[in-house]
Image: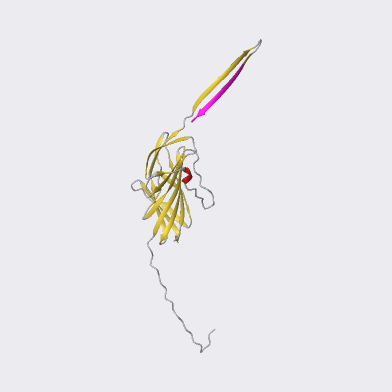
Amino acid sequence: LLGPREPLEVRWKPQVQLADAKLVLSSQANTVVDVRAGVMQVDALFDFQIAQGKLETLTFQVPVGLSITAVHGAFIRTWALGDVTDGVRPLRVELSRAQDRDYRLRIHAEAAIGSLPATVEVPVIEPTGDIRAGGHLAVGTNSALQLVVQASSGLTQIDAAAFPRIQTQDGQIRGIPQGKAFFYTYAGSRYRLGLLVDDIVPAYEVAGRMIARVKEDDLVIDAELEIDVRD
C-alpha cells in the first residue's frame, strides 16, 4: 500500500507488433494404396514443414471418383469438399489453432474399380498452393489379383526396403500390402501411375497313380493323386 506522500512512478513499455510473415511451407507425403476386389483404398500421410509464417488452412486437389472417408490431424476445425472443376474437387481443411511448426495430416479415401480386367489410374491427392512437395508411394495388393504397371510418369521405382515405414500417432506401423507391390519416390506432387488389374486364374496339374488288386471275392483299388496349383 502507498502512503499519502509516497511517490508513484509509472513507466510504459511499447509493444512491437510483428507483421504477418508470408507462409513458407514444404510437404513430404507417404501414400499407401491397397488394391482390392472392387475398390482401391488410399492412405495418404502428409508431413508439412513450416519454415515461416503460420498455417491455418490446407487445400488439396482430389480427383473425381475418389471418395474422402476420413481426415485426421491435430486441431482440425472442419474439412469439406468443393465442387468439381476440371476433373478435380478441392479439399479444404481448416485448423482451429494456427500452426508455426511441423504439422501432420492423414487422409483416408477410396475409389471404385469396375469389373475385371480393369484399367485404373492410381488417384493422386495433391496439396495446392506455393508448396514444395515430394514423397513416397506404395501400391500393392493382398488379394488374389494381378497388378501390371501400364504407364507411369514423375515416379522413380525403389526397393521395398527403401520405403519409409511411418508410425501413426498411436504408435502403430501403417499396413503395407504384402503381396504384389510396387514402391516409388517422387519430387513434386504431380505423378501418374496406370495399372491393369485382373483376377489371378490358377492352373492345376494333376498326376495320378492307381493300383488295382483282384482277389477271389474283392476288387481293391488304391489311388494316389498329386495336385499342383500355380497362380
Q: What kind of secondary structure does the magenta stretch mostly adopt? A: strand
Count of numbered marks:
0
Residue 175: image location, x then y, percent: 51, 45
Look at the image and say whether residue 224 sits in the magenta stretch. Answer: yes
Residue 146 is situated, as x and y percent measured from the top left of the image, at 45, 35
Q: Magenta span has 223?
A: yes
Highlighted magenta segment, given as a residue range: 221-231
Q: Nearer the viewer, residue 187 or 215?
A: 187
Q: Quadrant of residue 115?
A: top left
> Residue 177, percent across and down?
49, 41
From this viewpoint, which residue is outermost toward the right?
216
Is residue 58 positioned above or below 163 on the image?
A: below
Q: What residue is rendered at 58% in x and 21% in y?
A: 224
What residue occupies the far bottom of the structure in this picture?
Answer: 5
The quadrant of the image that shows the N terminus is: bottom right
Estimate the x, y position of residue 138 in percent, counting from the top left: 45, 44
- Residue at the extreme left of the image, as rendered: 86
Kindly identify the residue that appears in the image at 46 percent across and 35 percent down: 145
What's the colour scheme? secondary structure
Q: State the residue at coordinates (43%, 57%).
A: 49
